[in-house]
Amino acid sequence: MKKLINDPRAVVDESVEGFGLAHADLVTVSAEPKYVTRRDAPVAGKVGLVSGGGSGHEPLHAGFVGLGMLDAAVPGAVFTSPTPDQILPATLAVNSGAGVVHIVKNYTGDVLNFETAAEMAQAEGVEVRTVLVNDDVAVEDSLYTAGRRGVGGTVLVEKIAGAAAERGDDLDAVAAIGDRVNQNVRTMGVALSACTVPHAGKPSFDLEDNEIEIGIGIHGEPGRHRIAMEPADGITDRLMEPILSDLGVASGDKVLLFVNGMGGTPLGELYIVYRRAAQVLADRGATVERSLVGNYITSLEMQGCSISVLRLDDDMTALWDAPVHTAALRRGV
Amino acid sequence: MKKLINDPRAVVDESVEGFGLAHADLVTVSAEPKYVTRRDAPVAGKVGLVSGGGSGHEPLHAGFVGLGMLDAAVPGAVFTSPTPDQILPATLAVNSGAGVVHIVKNYTGDVLNFETAAEMAQAEGVEVRTVLVNDDVAVEDSLYTAGRRGVGGTVLVEKIAGAAAERGDDLDAVAAIGDRVNQNVRTMGVALSACTVPHAGKPSFDLEDNEIEIGIGIHGEPGRHRIAMEPADGITDRLMEPILSDLGVASGDKVLLFVNGMGGTPLGELYIVYRRAAQVLADRGATVERSLVGNYITSLEMQGCSISVLRLDDDMTALWDAPVHTAALRRGV
Amino acid sequence: MTVTLDVTWAVKWLTLSAQAMAEHRVELIELDRAIGDSDHGENMDRGFQAVLDKLAETPPETPGAALKLTAMALMSKVGGAAGPLYGTAFLRAATALGDAAYVDAPALAAALGAARDGIVARGKAESGDKTMVDAWTPAVEAAMAAAGDGDTLAVLIAAAEAAEAGAVATDPLVARKGRASYLGERSAGHRDPGAASSALILRAAAGAAA
Amino acid sequence: MTVTLDVTWAVKWLTLSAQAMAEHRVELIELDRAIGDSDHGENMDRGFQAVLDKLAETPPETPGAALKLTAMALMSKVGGAAGPLYGTAFLRAATALGDAAYVDAPALAAALGAARDGIVARGKAESGDKTMVDAWTPAVEAAMAAAGDGDTLAVLIAAAEAAEAGAVATDPLVARKGRASYLGERSAGHRDPGAASSALILRAAAGAAA
Ligand SMILES: Nc1ncnc2c1ncn2[C@@H]1O[C@H](COP(=O)(O)OP(=O)(O)O)[C@@H](O)[C@H]1O
Ligand SMILES: Nc1ncnc2c1ncn2[C@@H]1O[C@H](COP(=O)(O)OP(=O)(O)O)[C@@H](O)[C@H]1O
Ligand SMILES: [Mg+2]
Ligand SMILES: [Mg+2]
Ligand SMILES: [Mg+2]
Ligand SMILES: [Mg+2]
């Protein structure tokens, strides 16, 4: 294992400290318990947005703290959801009285820890709504599993719900638009290589030189099935098919196309995937109205990508376009 | 070799095509000869900025085409500088009459090809100035080599010279500020792993599991020397020392600190490096006024990073802060 | 011979648990690597180190207090799925024990039952879903059965053995809860890490009483 | 026996060069991988394929025209350092040959000399800098020496052999120009890829005349 780290157990501490130093104009970092808040939090009258999860997905979530997106991010250990004693103070810190929305990726750990924190916050008089993100179509039998995972769609939920909060939508409205984004987005991922969790010191799964994992999540867990390596167009088709059929994309639909790198894939390759995905959408008669290409929700140094398709309506598009000023996403500011 | 590509020989074509599709609001792509121009080029009265080089460094250069930065980017084959028959039409396409600045990274191939194109453009009546970027302190005996390479500093030159052109500086002024940035920036890089050029199909060098390369360039060429793996703080110190002593950073200096990922390193690790680099600067009494952390000039999927330190003056800082709207860098728009 | 389970036992239990997590850290990481995200051993080790710190900081006066402190430490330091589940388990067990100074066999079995119920209440897993419940449920049943004789050590040994057998029995199962469930059929052929750590904790409880 | 070097020879030379680049593509990539950026074989192969296309498109009428077309194709398709250097080399050689229909031994040696001078003018490398110059300079010297006898084939063979020896002689050198120079001492012990491709091209010139 070769990584730009010091003590494997200090990875999150030091990384978040560096993040705070680099973006002191945007955020404030609480070291213990660990969470990152927007520098001007709580913003008077504004619904607070809190998200969080295991570390190792950077820039998610701390990279999305700032105007027009999250008010707080709560980083757990690598690939381990944070604990209520982090989530609760983050929630309290961003509550201006207008209530707080928790954006939670659907994993047992995240759900349980945020649930506890929400209960505790409510006990302290803070109204909390939870938007559960579960956009991963790789999980098929969601009745017999922990349900679909929250993956790439999370970034879109955070941006759009964040913009809604920023324009002054109330608690229920912000939660509702978050839910609406989640209902209209589907994601599927592929890994060309595994990642290595620092404290584990070994790749999270073993892949042969000619194999890839289809339907991976974002925690280095193996995917749904393993196939022989293929050209990018074929892989893209495999990812697009379940996304489009599950979402029921029809001719005339307007969509946002998001090709996300898992951390170790060159940006140039993501554009090769984007090219094919855009062709597939054009073939379906859908119009790509907005796009996002890059490393936004990663799995450490994993090679691979995920594709998300979000069916847009006018309000979502306007909120997507709204100003945002965070470390990882910025426009209009 | 596992990559999200189709035919290794179509990598640049398809990637640039995808880039054009994803950012049609910002750029126009010419497929043959291949170059990318700002959508509204030529901008009347504005000095044109053209850069280019081998592909595989994305988002450099096409990702920096747009308002406040480059007017055109000219992508060569992977790690191969582009040819005059691409550079010339790109230069002509962005010339509004105010002349064109070529921003050229100091490699024999880039220098020769841009030189030829500049001559040809001049023969067609376009005034051309060249800003040569050579910020890499890893190259020690520059008398006995092709000279220092252009690496991370290129991004800063493109941003700051681009802002100068956008505010209306004339040809000589834009070239002069580009040169000033180059004179005030130093960079040094480290590789934890090699990258694999698609058509070569093999890693560009072989590293043992416990070895790293200090002083790498951005083309997967081996570095100056090889050492045993070390904690991130030690590696950071090794990169900072030659940067700071060569640049002569003194107490009271204001600097921009740029920690750049080589493509395969998790963002979280870059912040660990940033943390230490910021400490080192603080120890010297320098103030980090601006920062940039992320994958901006990469070497395919190489793991590692480079650190650049730019000594700022007020004009450079203002130009750094000026609006920019490109695929990879955006603010104020 | 009936062993008296008092706060000393409880502290020793937690200390042995912490030792077991440290010793089996890599093994639990490996189990989680196969069907999860490679963190279970790290999380449990970090959590129980925090328990040790808290025990040293504010030595508890009753077994119930020791378990409550453990619940709080695990809840705030483990994270992931295991943190809240173990946190709830220890909290419910602590509540069941109240502030009694000594734990007899029926109270012990009831506390284990309460712990298991807490896990089920939070995680909604059923037996056979390939989770820590598959260690706890047989453990509780064995404890209940043994409790009649009044021998606390026997109760703990029965629970530990049943938990170990239960953990082994997760090997062929297809996961239906937690992260391993995403693997579908591919989760079969691997032991559930949470069931394995549960067996270690229950073995530590018996070890502390021996 | 003196071979007549006409446009047929020139086209055959370029065709054999293209074949050599395709055949030795991987080898040249490997040489460049060791001390450069792994693209030389790919670039030269792409460039000479473009030369073949151009030759087919607009068949040249003189050796000089064939070399000029080659210069243009290489300049616009190779990129990197080698593109402009070979482009200049072929352009200068073409200029030296003018529009003569036949090339005699002195003209041939002079054209090779012009090519070499072009490379030096563009790249500023000296002998011993571990570049393609280290193949071209001995080749030109050998060609000049052989030219007196008037035997064009002998001139080409002498040039090819000297270029090959020159390329081999780059092995121990420390590079002082081009990308390999960044490696400093570590560049020693590897053959310069541009010197190797130069030797192949000059060998093809001899092969075309044989
Ligand atoms: N719904 C659930 N009910 C009971 N136990 C569960 C449930 N989900 C997960 N677990 C247990 O948690 C263990 C995983 O813990 P851990 O790896 O620490 O958390 P995470 O899955 O969040 O990384 C599993 O092995 C399983 O025993
Ligand atoms: N300044 C120079 N003068 C002469 N030849 C040079 C010079 N610089 C580089 N070369 C030649 O170019 C070759 C490398 O070509 P290539 O790999 O295609 O270009 P690049 O170095 O741009 O990747 C070297 O092996 C060397 O022979
Ligand atoms: Mg986890
Ligand atoms: Mg090259
Ligand atoms: Mg886990
Ligand atoms: Mg090369």
Image (cartoon, coloured by chain):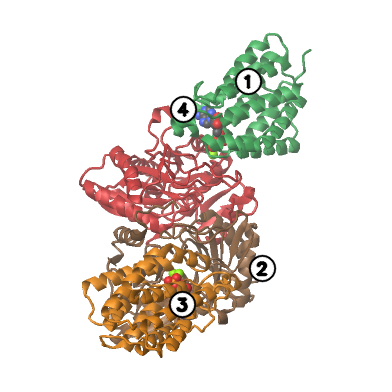
Chain colours: A red, B brown, C green, D orange
* Label pair 3/1, CB-CB below 8 angstroms: no
Mark 3 is surrounded, within 10 Å at the Cα level, by few (under 14), some (14 to 19) or many (20 or more) other residues, namely: some
| Residue B99: x %, y % from top left | 33, 83
Both on one chain, marks 3 and 4?
no
What's the CA distance linking mark 3 and mark 2? 60 Å
Residue tagged by mark 3? D161
* Residue C112, numbered circle: 1
Residue at the spot 61% in from the left edge and 28% down from the top edge: C196
Q: Amino acid at mark 4?
A: Arg
* Label pair 2/4, CB-CB below 8 angstroms: no
* Label pair 4/1, CB-CB below 8 angstroms: no
Some atom of ligand 1 lies within 8 Å of the CB belonging to the residue at label 1: no
The residue furthest top is C149
Nearest-to-viewer mark from 4 and 1 = 4
Report the quarter where the N terminus of chain C lies: top right
Is label 4 in a helix, a strand or a loop?
loop
Is label 1 in a helix, a strand or a loop?
helix
Question: Mark 1, chain letter?
Answer: C
